[in-house]
Image (cartoon, rainbow, N blue to C red):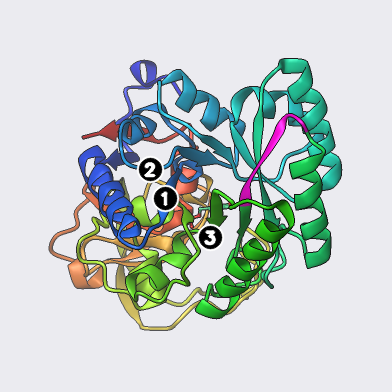
């Protein structure tokens, strides 16, 4: 979008870069206190350069992303590596992977072979972290013997690949919580790899933000020395909302969505007529009859943030009712006196809206 042509101001995403830096420093320090290095995961804000720059000279162990574009951007901005690619690679992206990333998460032998060939061609070394599936059923070796064999082969056979360590991912697909028990399994496996290769591994990577509760509670198994952290540094909402960890030291307002009210009326709260499907083919009974209420529409929609249930109104008198692709529907009965036509309403957010809003061409980005 060309703002200077449209002169549009809203919807707007305000990003507080100082508060982001504060959160990064807090998490890095807390992890360091448990002997854990934290890599900063930047996919959640699409690697936007202004935000990425905040990670310059911070204490993270390099930068990680699922998209090579973000790591390339980090390189251009002069950020310090290692640059860690955290989506197991496509065979078709190996030349870019080897050129851009220093390390990657890996779960297929055939991919390591392709990396070895490409490294030889580019005369550039690459570090591999082999992934173990501990039950979440996303990426990683399920057969532990297969993992041990590949670790040994990587160490002994591949000339251009360094075996950096092993890691796991939890919570993302199967909703499986990281626990002292399943992460102890990772540590035990790391020790078995070390016996096979006759040296210590540099990295035993115990997950993402969802592994931080173990750090906060002092329950992280000894031997986990690395985490890959995005959310807790950025929206910083999950630890309190879903994990029962109090984090008053983290700013929850790094990202604020501002949207403008374009309609304000008293209307029934229950749709009138025959209920079929909404604009996205859903038939769920999501409507509650609370009689006539003051409703507002803000000019922003699912095209911009995807899930409206992950938007958190700053004004406690506002309730998010739903959204279509371009309209956000609010109950403002309790905030009647404050909300007028043209008012700007503000929202904090969980991870999802950050992910989409920072990738929407329709949002004005404002940095402070
Ligand atoms: C996204 C991702 C992370 C970071 O997750 P957060 O919840 O943002 O901390 C870590 N590891 C992998 C493999 C990921 O895909």
Cβ of mark 1 under 8 Å from ligand 1: the answer is no
Q: Percent x, y for residue 255?
A: 31, 47
With 125 as the anchor, is 234 left or right in this view? left
Looking at this view, is 244 or 105 the one in front?
A: 105
Query: Mark on residue 207?
Result: 3
Along the line of sight, the residue nearer the viewer: 271 or 60:
60
The residue segment tinted magenta is 159-165
Is the residue marked by circle 3 packed among few (<14), some (14-19), or many (20+) residues within 10 Å? many
Kindly report the distance in space between the C-alpha atoms of the residues bearing marks 3 and 2.
15 Å
Q: Which residue is mark 1?
A: 38
N-term-proximal mark, 1 vs 3 = 1
Contact check, label 1 and label 2, Cβ < 8 Å:
yes
**In this view, 111 is above or below 247:** above
Quadrant housing residue 137: bottom right
For the C terminus, the quadrant is top left
Residue positioned 46% across, 18% down in the render: 76
> Mark 1 and 3 residues: CB-CB less than 8 Å, in contact?
no
| Residue 127 spot, x, y in % from top left | 64, 37
Side of 134 where 367 appears, left or right: left
Please, which residue is most extreme toward the front here? Answer: 198
Q: Is residue 119 magenta?
A: no
Mark toward the start of the polypeptide (3 vs 2): 2
Q: Characterize the local packing of mark 1: few (<14), some (14-19) or many (20 or more) Cα atoms within 10 angstroms.
A: many
Q: Which residue lies under the disc numbered 2?
A: 60
Examine the rendering and report whether any part of residue 268 can be seen.
no
The residue depicted at 29 percent of the width and 40 percent of the height is 15
Kindly indicate the quadrant of the structure image that contains residue 189: bottom right
Q: Secondary structure at mark 3?
A: loop
The answer to whether 324 is drawn above or below residue 79 in the figure is below
């Amino acid at each position: 979008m060309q703002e200077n042509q449209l002169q549009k101001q809203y919807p707007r995403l305000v990003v507080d870069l100082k508060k982001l830096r504060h959160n990064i420093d807090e998490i890095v320090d807390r992890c360091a206190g448990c002997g854990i290095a934290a890599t900063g995961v930047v996919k959640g804000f699409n690697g936007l350069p202004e935000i990425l720059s905040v990670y310059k000279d911070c204490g993270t162990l390099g930068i990680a992303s699922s998209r090579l574009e973000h790591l390339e951007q980090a390189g251009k901005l002069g950020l310090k590596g290692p640059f860690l690619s955290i989506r197991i690679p496509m065979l078709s992206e190996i030349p870019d992977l080897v050129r851009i990333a220093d390390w990657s998460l890996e779960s297929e032998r055939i991919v390591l072979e392709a990396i070895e060939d490409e490294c030889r061609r580019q005369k550039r070394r690459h570090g591999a972290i082999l992934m173990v599936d501990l039950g979440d059923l996303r990426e990683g070796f399920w057969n532990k013997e297969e993992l041990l064999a590949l670790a040994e082969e990587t160490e002994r056979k591949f000339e251009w690949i360094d075996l950096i360590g092993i890691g796991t991912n939890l919570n993302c697909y199967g909703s499986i919580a990281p626990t002292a028990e399943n992460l102890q399994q990772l540590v035990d496996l790391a020790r078995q790899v070390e016996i096979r290769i006759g040296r210590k591994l540099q990295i035993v990577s115990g997950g993402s933000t969802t592994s931080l509760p173990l750090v906060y509670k002092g329950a992280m198994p000894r031997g986990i020395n690395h985490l890959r952290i995005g959310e807790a540094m950025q929206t910083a909402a999950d630890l309190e909302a879903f994990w029962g960890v109090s984090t008053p030291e983290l700013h929850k307002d790094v990202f604020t969505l501002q949207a403008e009210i374009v309609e304000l009326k008293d209307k029934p709260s229950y749709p009138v007529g025959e209920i079929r499907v909404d604009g996205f083919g859903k038939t769920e009974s999501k409507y509650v009859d609370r009689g006539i209420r003051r409703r507002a529409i803000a000019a922003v929609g699912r095209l911009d943030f995807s899930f409206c249930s992950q938007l958190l109104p700053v004004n406690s008198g506002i309730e998010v009712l739903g959204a279509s692709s371009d309209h956000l529907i609010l109950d403002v009965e309790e905030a009647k006196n404050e909300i007028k036509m043209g008012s700007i309403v503000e929202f904090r957010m969980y991870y999802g809206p950050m992910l989409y809003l920072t990738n929407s061409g329709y949002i004005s980005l404002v940095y402070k």
